Image: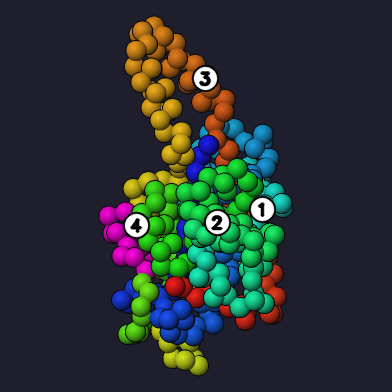
């Protein structure tokens, strides 16, 4: 079993405050629309890699070239020589939230449409209060392990504070979608400090390329914006884990067996080792990972979607 990567998305003030008394201390409709677009449409490399078609038309060198370009956020040219297409039946993305965040969402927007909703709570009886299509787990690791057995799109942690604190320490946390809200706000709930030795802020050019490959019909808005009604200044930012590429991570339950396997390999004779290496190289060439996709169908946002309420962090 492998644990899928996930991203976190949040709006936070300069002091990392995200809410007070269960309420968001600012009103930014642009951020609400951005939240829906990202959580519905964004496909990370892990997701794209599982739903590529027409791979038989590509040789190994071309597949490696596309994978390399996507991994380093380079634009990929789609031509007759690269007949890659995403299947139309990509599963919905996943939004993972704590119980208080779930309860803060107005009933008419709950569960969040066009996404798989997951609630984390230590209350084992809480699932009885949830709609049938909403999943419920008692921990983040339990959630990720169960999702690894399902078909799903990209995974997003959307709050609240405890979920963010746990998520940012997790090795599978790949991206941070931060709406930086300028100004001073009195908050009692905070987003954790972002470790700058692990996550790096992407520049606008890099983010534009990320959007070009992952969100074909959503344009990246650069720089500081101002909401005309409230006068609130804000900026969309994306941080990416810098030291670890988007790799699948083994389940903690498998770690012990993997170590035992590695230990047994150390006792092999030189001839056995050489033979195994030869077999491995042959298998690697034949079972190379599927190429990543660069074409994605757009989802049309209904007029009512602009009024969708963003979750209130607690």
| Residue drawn at (54%, 75%) of the image | 104
Report the Cα–Cα distance between label 4 and label 3: 36 Å
**Tag of residue 199:** 4
Q: Is residue 62 visible?
A: no
Marks 2 and 4, the one that precedes in the sequence: 2
Residue 199 on the magenta span:
yes
User: Main structural element of the magenta stretch: helix, strand or loop?
Assistant: loop
Residue holding disc 1: 91
Residue holding disc 2: 124
In the rendering, at what x and y percent does residue 300 appear? 69, 69
Other residues around mark 1 within 10 Å, as few (<14) / some (14–19) / many (≥20): some
Residue holding disc 3: 282
| Residue drawn at (36%, 72%) of the image | 190
| Residue drawn at (34%, 16%) of the image | 266
Is label 2 in contact with label 4 (beta carbons under 8 Å)?
Answer: no
* Relative to 151, 67 lies left or right: left
Secondary structure of residue under mark 1: loop
Marks 4 and 1, the one that precedes in the sequence: 1
Of 221 and 150, the residue lying toward us: 150
The stretch in magenta equals 191-203
Marks 2 and 3, the one that precedes in the sequence: 2
* Relative to 138, 296 lies left or right: right
């Amino acid at each position: 079993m492998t644990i899928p990567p996930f991203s976190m998305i949040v709006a936070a003030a300069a002091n990392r405050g995200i809410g007070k008394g269960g309420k968001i201390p600012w009103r930014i409709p642009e951020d609400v629309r951005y939240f829906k677009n990202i959580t519905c449409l964004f496909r990370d490399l892990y997701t794209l890699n599982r739903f590529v078609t027409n791979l038989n038309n590509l040789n190994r060198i071309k597949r490696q070239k596309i994978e390399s370009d996507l991994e380093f956020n380079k634009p990929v040219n789609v031509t007759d020589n690269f007949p890659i297409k995403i299947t139309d039946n990509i599963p919905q993305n996943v939004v993972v939230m704590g119980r208080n965040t779930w309860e803060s969402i107005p009933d008419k927007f709950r569960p969040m449409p066009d996404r798989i909703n997951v609630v984390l709570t230590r209350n084992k009886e809480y699932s009885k209060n949830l709609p049938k299509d909403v999943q419920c787990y008692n921990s983040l690791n339990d959630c990720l392990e169960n999702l690894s057995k399902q078909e799903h799109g990209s995974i997003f942690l959307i709050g609240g504070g405890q979920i963010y604190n746990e998520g940012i320490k997790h090795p599978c946390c790949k991206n941070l979608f931060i709406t930086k809200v300028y100004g001073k706000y009195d908050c009692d709930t905070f987003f954790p400090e972002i470790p700058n030795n692990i996550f790096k802020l992407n520049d606008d050019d890099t983010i534009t390329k990320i959007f070009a490959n992952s969100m074909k019909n959503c344009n990246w808005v650069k720089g500081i914006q101002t909401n005309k009604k409230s006068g609130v200044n804000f900026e969309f930012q994306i941080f990416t884990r810098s030291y670890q590429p988007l790799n699948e991570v083994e389940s903690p339950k498998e770690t012990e067996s993997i170590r035992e396997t590695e230990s047994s390999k150390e006792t092999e004779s030189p001839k056995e080792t050489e033979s195994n290496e030869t077999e491995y190289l042959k298998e690697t060439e034949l079972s190379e990972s599927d190429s990543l996709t660069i074409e994605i169908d757009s989802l049309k946002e209904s007029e009512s979607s602009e009024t969708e309420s963003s979750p209130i962090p607690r």
